[in-house]
Image: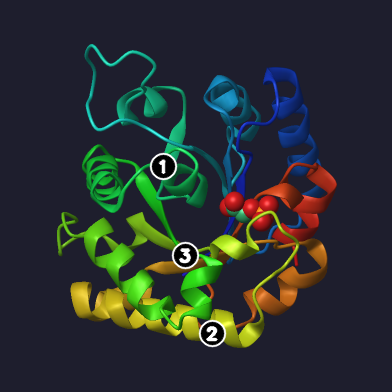
Amino acid sequence: MKKLMAANWKMFKTWDEARATAQELVDLAAAKLPGDREVLVFPQFTALKGVADVFQGIDGFSVGGQDYYIKEEGAYTGEISPKMLESVGAVYGLTGHSERRHVLGEDDEYIGAKTSYGLESGLKVVFCIGEKIEDRKAGRVEEVLEHQIRVGLKNVPINIDPENLSIAYEPVWAIGTGEVAGPEEILEAHAFTRKILISIFGEKANEMRVLYGGSVKPANCAEIIALDNVDGVLVGGASLEGESFSQIVLA
Ligand code: PGA
């Protein structure tokens, strides 16, 4: 199983800026990329085609859409479909990100509908979960993660190709705060996530990637990526510069 080194560019970068960062990343990392690593960038929709073009023909580099709606087309002003993302080169889609849950108000049911619809539409999906600090303080981490996983994946067919579904554990309190989760916290959450995935999908859940996200930086990536059940990272802030994300990708 290849480790998935993913960048979430959120609402940053114009067309030119995104292409320049993507090119810098290719220049710094493509030739040295180990065979067991895969690089994925989630740019803004407006830059998706530009970044996909920069990655064209480069082994192990792909792009994904940060969001999509649960219909192929129709009168849904402002929305975008998996097919439209695929038509400009997206291979992946992102669901359940903390900002979509807690800033933009998406609930578990809608995130679940998006996750299954994206997979059905041919995207590989990175589905995010994670507890808030008050959940952790109240000892509710497992309860929150289990609920998010079970509702979020309830419509995903059991016979899914495990390569097409990755789960990103991103504790909300670690996102954009500089406060990375400790090794014990990551190990526990990832082992628990794997256990729930196995209870749903059986042994093939061992082939699903479980990523960690939340204040991953060049200085902490090597330690995180070496932990049991950590099959990649999802990086926000430190992915915005080609130099820093290339160090993460190669860590
Ligand atoms: P961060 O963001 O790396 O800036 O903490 C992670 C994410 O939002 O996926």
Q: What residue sits right under mark 3 in the picture?
A: 130
- Nearer the observer: mark 2 or 3; the answer is 3
**Sequence-first disc among 2 and 3:** 3
Q: Is residue 181 left or right of residue 99?
A: right
Amino acid carrying label 3: it is Gly
**Sequence-first disc among 2 and 1:** 1
Q: Are marks 2 and 3 in contact (CB under 8 Å)?
A: no
Amino acid carrying label 1: it is Gly
Taking the spot 33% from the left edge, 13% from the top edge, the residue there is 77
Q: Nearer the viewer, residue 97 or 20?
A: 97
Q: What residue sits right under mark 2 in the picture?
A: 187
Q: What residue sits right under mark 1 in the picture?
A: 93
Mark number displayed over residue 119: none
Question: Residue 111, relative to residue 72: is it above or below?
Answer: below
Question: Residue 59, relative to residue 231: is it above or below?
Answer: above
> What SS does tag 3 mark?
loop
Q: Nearer the viewer, residue 53 or 143?
A: 143
Asked whether the viewer can see residue 192, the reply is yes
Q: Could you tell me residue 20's position as x and y percent? A: 78, 28
CA distance for labels 2 and 3: 14 Å
Taking the spot 44% from the left edge, 67% from the top edge, the residue there is 209
